[in-house]
Image (cartoon, rainbow, N blue to C red):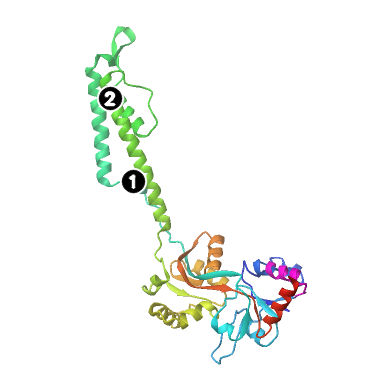
Amino acid sequence: MTFCAQNPPYASLKPEDKLLTGNDRFEGFCIDLCRELARLLHFKFELRLARDSQYGARNMRGEWTGMIRELVDREADFAIGDLTITREREEAVDFTTPFMMVGIGVLIRRPYRPPRLFYLLSPLTPEVWAYLGGAYIGVSILLYLLARFSPYEWVPGVGGYFRNQFSLANSLWFTMGSLMQQGCDISPRALSTRLVATFWWFFTLILVSTYTANLAALLIAERMKSPIETAEDLSKQNVIQYGCVEDGSTRDFFRESNNEAYSRMFHTMEHAKPRVYVPTLQEGVERVLREPGTYALLAESASLEHAAAQHCELMAVGGLLNTRGYGIATPSGTLSLLHIVVVVHC
């Protein structure tokens, strides 16, 4: 009999599980792995969930819980799922070679920043905007005056009168069209006005390119900015509470760590009010969504990346701590038999 813990995408019940029976009720990466092993090694299996939905840890009496307890009691042939290989668990059961390597990360909700009215002005400083306004007015007036003095800008009009297309309004419109990269329906004729227009076009080209680059960098920086960057940042603040799965390997890591910051984090989690531990990873993800900006979840990186991919409001941050592997657990002393079968089959 095979034993698994429910935690997508590794192993979970299908939405229509009440209409199905047997192993067809389950889906996930570990379920597919189990079926592939059964096909290669030619054995039949039956899947069922853990009685207490726990991975396995020692309680206050020193007894095992969860999947490890059922392996110790020989109620299951092997346990499969996102079961982390730890030194303490290896003393009670046997593990196969890891099929996935993970580390501990932090899951938080993306910080919400309300839109600002003049946000598009942020790429340039107020001084630059003031200089730009002065340059716009100055170039428009210079263009107007040069067009007035140059005879090449005067063309015959209706009634034999000469007219100048660069009035003050048209000069302002011409420089604005060039600044916005839209062009204009009028163009200079004299050499002097063409030189002014050429220099203005070159200036606007550099200005628009600089503004676009600064705006893109600002948007990326705003999106990536987070109040928490690493697990150590959690230990240095008291606004955001943090927790982990109650009977998981993440809690064991912080409890047994000799690092001062991690030991302090474990002490904070143990005495936090309200309680920060969660029964399952899914409930931890739901709590992060339910308590934005006030709760962070510590768990294996692969599970956090999957949760962040499923919920756009979430993000996984921080470097990976305590890199470990997921393995298939069997009762103590039985893994050697499995090795013999694998060698003979190959």
The residue located at (67%, 88%) in the rendering is: 73
Residue 114 visible, this orientation: no
Is 231 placed above or below 179 here? Answer: below
Q: Is residue 178 magenta?
A: no
> Does the residue at mark 2 contact the one at mark 1 (Cβ under 8 Å)?
no
Between 79 and 312, the one lying in front of the other is: 79
Front residue of 239 and 225: 225
Q: Secondary structure at mark 1?
A: helix
Residue in view at x 34 percent, y 10 percent:
158
Say which mark, if any, is on residue 195. 2
Q: Exactly how many numbered labels are in the figure?
A: 2
Location of mark 1 (residue): 121
Magenta-highlighted residues: 32-45
Q: Position of residue 182 (x, y in %)?
A: 40, 31
Give the number of the disc on residue 59: none
Mark 1 crowdedness (10 Å alpha carbons): few <14, some 14-19, many ≥20: few
Quarter of the figure with the C terminus: bottom right
Q: What amino acid is labelled 1 in the image?
A: Leu
Judge from the rendering whether residue 145 lies leftward or rightward of residue 332; answer left or right: left
Magenta-colored stretch includes residue 40: yes
Looking at the picture, which amino acid does disc 2 mark?
Answer: Leu
Magenta stretch secondary structure, dominant: helix
